[in-house]
Amino acid sequence: MALDWTPNSNHIGFFVAQEKGFYADVEIAFEIINPALDNYARTPAKKVELGNADLALCPFESVISYQTKAVTFDAVAIATVFQEDLSAIVVRKDSNIKSPKDLDNCSYASYKARYEDEIVKQMIKNDGGEGSIRVVYPQKLGIWQTIENTTYDATWVFMNWEGVEATSKGLVLRSFKLSDFGIPYSYSPIIMGSRTRVAKSKEVYANFLSATKKGFLFSKDYPNEAAEILKPFLPKKDRQIDLIDSLKISASALENEDSWGVMSKKRVQDFINWLNLNELETTKLNFDDLVYPNLI
């Protein structure tokens, strides 16, 4: 699996499942690919397309993007990590940005994802602004630091990770959730694979998800033990982050044995329809095009 970021609490279930032998129990040899190894030269989804990884962690819109680009790839979501959107657009609270409309003529540090910039601009418009934010593209693994050091004004983060990190450093953030501004955002991160490859080895992928579910629910039930498993894999700069606080925020979004990983047809379709309505995507897709059935 190619991770979407350097190891953090969003990945804890994979590390727990590996350490506790849950993958070995279902005869899966599992390797985690850290994007720091190539300094994010290729996205996780690109690594799957190229055959360098079987799976990727990425936002759900990456699946849409790969199925609608000029040369398509049969990307498909097989599960979501969280049932809630734990992400937000953030600014420093000591700035003059009180709501999204105040981001007009400010700077936004972007990950250069296909729909990202237009989603942020639409959020500003929905709040009464013009959507005239200045978009910049820093080095991916350094994006969060550009908000810390005031190089840029805003970016998109996970509140259960960078949000907790900010608190640990005494940095107070102001956050704007997409759902509060009329954007029915779907899921992030999701586990993505190739539909063709999944279909050829459906039992293996189903077993992988079963073991992964055990890992994430273990981290919810035994956060202290899970935190100790994850700690050695964190980048040195992140080891001061309070993993227990992070896991407390993540816990409710993991839900339970019956719901972990399951993606709501309505929630996915609402997001696709929103992209179409706002002309961010012209291809008409549906849930079954984008989510592999009956693996969980």
Image (cartoon, rainbow, N blue to C red):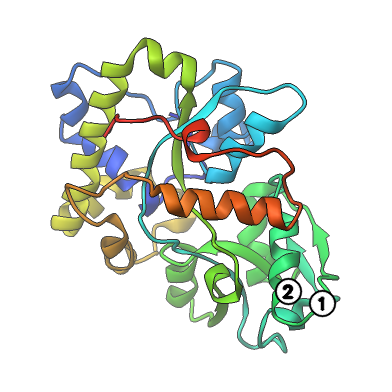
Question: Between residues 203 and 3, which one lies in front from this camera angle?
Answer: 203
Using residue 243 as the reference point, say whether residue 178 is left or right of it: right
In the picture, the disc for residue 104 is: 1
The residue indicated by pointer 2 is 124
Amino acid residing under circle 2:
Ile
Q: Quadrant of the N terminus?
A: top left
Q: Residue 10, which numbered label?
A: none
Q: Residue 232: image x %, image y %?
A: 32, 45
Point 50% across, 54% down: residue: 186
Instruction: Using the image as rendered, state which of residue 221 and residue 238 is in the foreground.
Output: 221
Helix, strand, or loop for circle 1?
Answer: loop
Q: Is 259 situated above or below 64?
A: below
- Residue extending farthest to the top is 200
x, y percent for residue 118: 75, 58
* Residue 249 makes an appearance in the image: yes
Q: Residues within 10 Å of mark 1 (few under 14, many from 20)?
A: some
Task: Please indicate, yes or no, whether residue 110 appears anywhere in the rendered image.
Answer: no
* CB contact under 8 Å: marks 2 and 1: yes
- The quarter of the picture where residue 54 lies is top left
